[in-house]
Amino acid sequence: MDSNVKKWSAEFIGTFWLTFGGCGSAVLAAAFPQLGIGFHGVALAFGLTVLTGAYALGPISGGHFNPAVSLGLVVGGRFKASELPGYVIAQVLGAIAAGAVLYAVATGKPGAELGGFATNGYGAHSPGGYGLVSALVIEVVLTAIFLIVILGATARRAASGFAGLAIGLCLTLIHLISIPVTNTSVNPARSTGVAVFGPEIAMGQLWVFWVAPLLGAAIGALIYRSLLSSGQED
């Protein structure tokens, strides 16, 4: 099989797993009567999808599962720009496939109410009622930090074998901080995958969850490359 097809397949599957596992925990389990997992459980679920996906699929594609991560790795000098379109397409398709499967499951009981369907938003669509500026700031800042952690954890000088753990725990922490603000994106594919099947307002606000994570990823990569890189780990 062509190496690109293997990489795209890994990114499709990994992004499917991230979207289905993370958003699925929010839609199906977060508020389950008496035993709901709440914000903490949802945050952990997103972290676990990245952790498991990174170790299983990372050796094939690098384990990006996120267009912002792929762009950040290009800016950070760790990924070829020519490979970016294929990765982004695979990631978005994987997320939409996950959204479709989750929609089929979530609507499979009488009287099902999808609510926000784990979509991201601001203003009236923010879990805590936070406005556009808050959404932009937190998504940019947290995606920048995410890229700094990714670049640092995957550097040659970093402890071998622990990158997936560090990245997964970082994503967990990111969700613990920002679920009340935007329901946490830091991933345009994840946002798109559920917005397609969610309330109309989610599609109207989706642009924020492309622009802010992509901008944040580029900023984080530039910070790491200019201030933190040893110049020998790329």
Image (cartoon, rainbow, N blue to C red):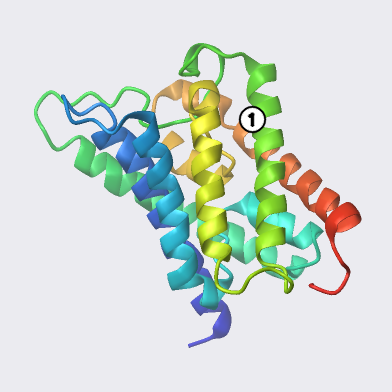
- Count up the numbered dots: 1
- Residue under the image location 74 percent in, 72 percent down: 157
Q: Residues within 10 Å of mark 1 (few under 14, many from 20)?
A: many
Task: Say if 136 sits above or below 216 in the image.
Answer: above
Q: In x, y percent, where is residue 10?
A: 47, 70
Q: Quadrant of residue 197 in the image? A: top left
**For residue 125, side relative to residue 163 (left or right):** left
**For residue 194, side relative to residue 223 (left or right):** left
- Residue under the image location 16 percent in, 25 percent down: 34
Residue 9 visible somewhere in the drawing: no
- Residue under the image location 44 percent in, 23 percent down: 200
Q: In x, y percent, where is residue 225?
A: 85, 58
Amino acid carrying label 1: it is Val
Task: Say which of 44 and 212 sits in front.
Answer: 44
Task: Say if 164 sits above or below 36 in the image.
Answer: below
**For residue 77, side relative to residue 27 (left or right):** right
Q: Residue most toward the bottom?
A: 1
Q: Please name the residue that numbered disc 1 is placed on.
A: 208
Q: Quick one: SS at disc 1? A: helix
- Which quadrant would the C terminus be assigned to in this image? bottom right
Q: Residue most toward the front?
A: 159
Q: In x, y percent, where is residue 142?
A: 65, 37
Task: Say if 8 sits above or below 213 in the image.
Answer: below
- Residue under the image location 11 percent in, 33 percent down: 109
Q: Quadrant of residue 136 in the image? A: top right
Q: In x, y percent, where is residue 87?
A: 59, 63
Residue 186 visible somewhere in the drawing: yes
Task: Say which of 173 and 46 sits in front.
Answer: 173
